[in-house]
Image (cartoon, grey):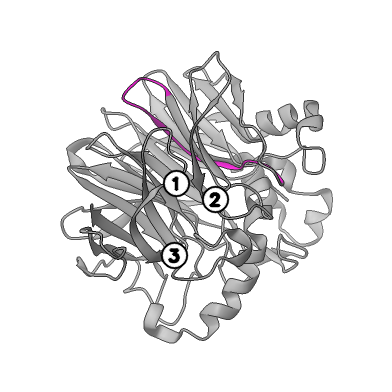
Amino acid sequence: MSGSRRALAITAASLCAVLAGTGPAWAGNGHGKGQGPKKHPGPAPGSEATVTQLASGLDNPRDLAFGPAGRLYLAEAGHGGSECVPGGPTGEEQCIGFTSGISRIDPSSGAHHRVLDGLVSAANPGGIFATGIDGVSLLGNGDLFGIETESSNVIPPEASKFLSADTIEKAKAELGRLIKTNPSGNWRSVADVGGFDFQWSLEHKELVPEQFPDANPYAVLTEGGRNWVADAASNTIDEVRANGSISVVAFIPNPPVSDSVPTCIDRGPDGALYIGELTGGGNAPGSSIVWRLVPGQAPTEWASGLTAVTGCGFGSDGQFYAVEFSTKGLDEAEPGTGAVVRVPPHSTSPTTVVDELSFPGGFAAAKGALYISNWSIAPANNGGGPTGEVLRIVP
């Protein structure tokens, strides 16, 4: 089980029971339709932030990124499929399908549609706790990159008892890949990051002996001629060059329990890379760190006191923000306990901007506003369509 999947397993198991009683109150508005912004609960007491729902009906929404002309793109992990293998991360079946992709969202109306569809996705039978395309990033010229979950090593030999040959072949060709796509929806593999990181962790098993070898590329930051990938299972930051070659530039140090599980990465105003971490299960609230990385040097602790970070980056105000999956920590995570926080440099306690969120995931910022994916591990359908949403927050 990958580092990030292991970290969220207990949350996913309890989420099924929690959501079973919520009924259609949490239902989305229908995939691809988008009902436009509406008021949404969430500003922290004393905060002047405003929160609106920009888009709804999203399928396990994860990372966000802006492209040319102010277009907003979203990675959707999908909801697995109909071919299931027993014994997934929560002890349930793990169902494989090709329901993951990348959507474009109109930042004015909230209307959204898939620009890339049909990529591999794995989830529990109800579509909960999916992984697929988890990260997305763009260049100024519109080149769009996505990162797929896991590695081909995650498919065991005995999978042929449960999965069709076509599904196994297609999944192995997509898992762990950094991909590049264009507006027509065609894509190509740039590099097998998951396969590289799995092998690296096998060769460095002493770093996390109870979990390695492992790989789960999760976040990507694209820059001219290269991509930076945060792997949430090998706990590495990788540099992927334009020719597809890969190198590990940093291993993110372990917290007191389990491993670091890096989930987000951004370039700071000072030119350094900044990385947020989820941390594996068993860590107390406040155990997550923001790391500052200058390639060629060891990562240094830049801020601390955060909890279960799933998204992060710099706003247009130059300040650093982080998305906390649950302020209660992973082991006690429940709906309404997620938050967006402002992280001052070298701080030991962040400032809450918005709270009462439900399993928030990715982060993007533009023109004074923050954009967050919410219900990032929700079921594919809870009485009215996919349940995920994107929120616009003006701090």
- Tag on residue 37? none
Mark 1 and mark 2 residues within 8 Å of each other at the beta carbon = yes
Q: Nearer the viewer, residue 69 or 40?
A: 40
Residue stretch rendered in magenta on the structure = 258-272
Asked if residue 316 lies left or right of residue 127, the reply is left
The mark nearer the N terminus, 1 or 2, is 2
- Tag on residue 349? 1
- What residue is pinned by disc 2? 286
**Residue 82 visible within the image:** no
Q: Nearer the viewer, residue 276 or 232?
A: 276
Residue at point 51%, 86% (across, down): 21
Magenta region includes residue 354: no
- What residue is pinned by disc 3? 375
Whole-percent x and y of residue 170?
A: 62, 46
Tell me which secondary structure the magenta stretch mostly adopts: loop
Secondary structure type for disc 1: loop
Whole-percent x and y of residue 9?
A: 66, 61
Residue at point 46%, 43% (across, down): 135
Mark 3 and mark 2 residues within 8 Å of each other at the beta carbon = no
Mark 1 and mark 3 residues within 8 Å of each other at the beta carbon = no
Identify residue type, mark 3: Trp
Question: What distance separates the C-alpha of mark 3 from that of mark 2?
Answer: 22 Å
Identify residue type, mark 1: Ser
